[in-house]
Structures are given as C-alpha cells and as structure tokens.
Amino acid sequence: MDNPAVKPLEFTLARSSTQFETKKKGLLPPSHVMMGKNTYDVKDYVKTHFDNVEYSDLLFPGPHGPKSITKTAWVVPIASQTASTGTLADGLGSRRGGRRQRRGGRAGRQRARRRRG
C-alpha cells in the first residue's frame, strides 16, 4: 500500500489437526491459530465472528524438551468456522497485508504489477 499512514498487518495463520497443545487443556481439537505482533489489531473482528475463540499459551518443542517453548496465540476451533461465519483465513485474507500480498516477496509483487497492467 502506498499510504504511509496505513500500517500493514503482519501475523501468522496456521492450521493443525492435533498439533496444538496447552498446559491447561492438553491437545486441542483441530484449530486455526493466529499469532504475531499485529494480532491485537484484528482481535475485535475475530471475537465478533467466532463465539469460542480463545487467547491461549501454546506449547512447542524446543532445545530444552518437547514442550519447552510457549507462544501465545488466538485459537479458533475449525468446528466453529461454519458457512455463515466463514473461516478465520477467509476473513483475514480479505484485509490488506494478508498472506496473499506478501507471498513471493519482491518477485511476487513484480508479477502482480505485470498482471494489473
């Protein structure tokens, strides 16, 4: 985006069937997670569209053991993403700065410019 007043969103979306785990709940059901420095900027959107979204500490393998790294993320169970609510990825992909805009780096941006004319 050419407007310097507009801050692009930067975060990671991930999906897993049973990979995500917390200390309190153990293995989570199939879920989408969103983590990164700009997740606070879209939290209201996520909360209004999905009833059972949670802000959770997820456990990941690290150098000191299989659950030695903790990362905080918004977790949305896939079961709560319906035809009426849409998916987390669909909702956030429509916003400027999502994965589609950053994918491919400089070469991807050049290809997109050529397609637009």
Image (cartoon, rainbow, N blue to C red):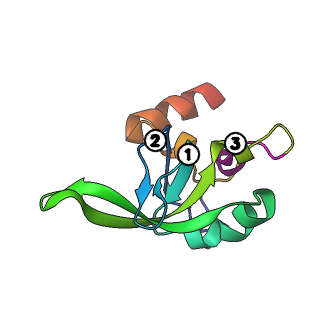
* Residue 16, position as x, y percentages in the image: 48, 40
Q: Is residue 28 above or below residue 36?
A: above
SS at mark 3? helix
* Front residue (pair 102, 15): 15
Q: Do the residues labelled 2 and 1 touch (CB within 8 Å)?
A: yes
Question: Mark 3 sits on what residue?
Answer: 79
Which disc, if any, is residue 18?
A: 2
Which disc, if any, is residue 29?
A: 1
Q: Are marks 3 and 1 in contact (CB under 8 Å)?
A: yes
Q: What is the C-alpha distance between the residues marked 3 and 1?
A: 9 Å
Give the class, few, some or many, for how many residues have Cα within 10 Å of label 2's Cα (few <14, many ≥20). few
Give the magenta range: 85-93
Give left or right: position of 27 versus 42: left
SS at mark 2? loop
- Sequence-wise, which precedes: disc 3 or disc 2? 2
Taking the view exactly as shown, the residue that stands out farthest to the top is 115
The amino acid pointed to by label 2 is: Thr
The amino acid pointed to by label 3 is: Ala
Does residue 30 appear in this view? yes
The amino acid pointed to by label 1 is: Pro
Which disc, if any, is residue 42?
A: none
Q: Residue at x 64, y 42 (%)?
A: 78
Which quarter of the figure is the C terminus placed in? top right
- Sequence-wise, which precedes: disc 2 or disc 1? 2
Give left or right: position of 116 versus 104: right
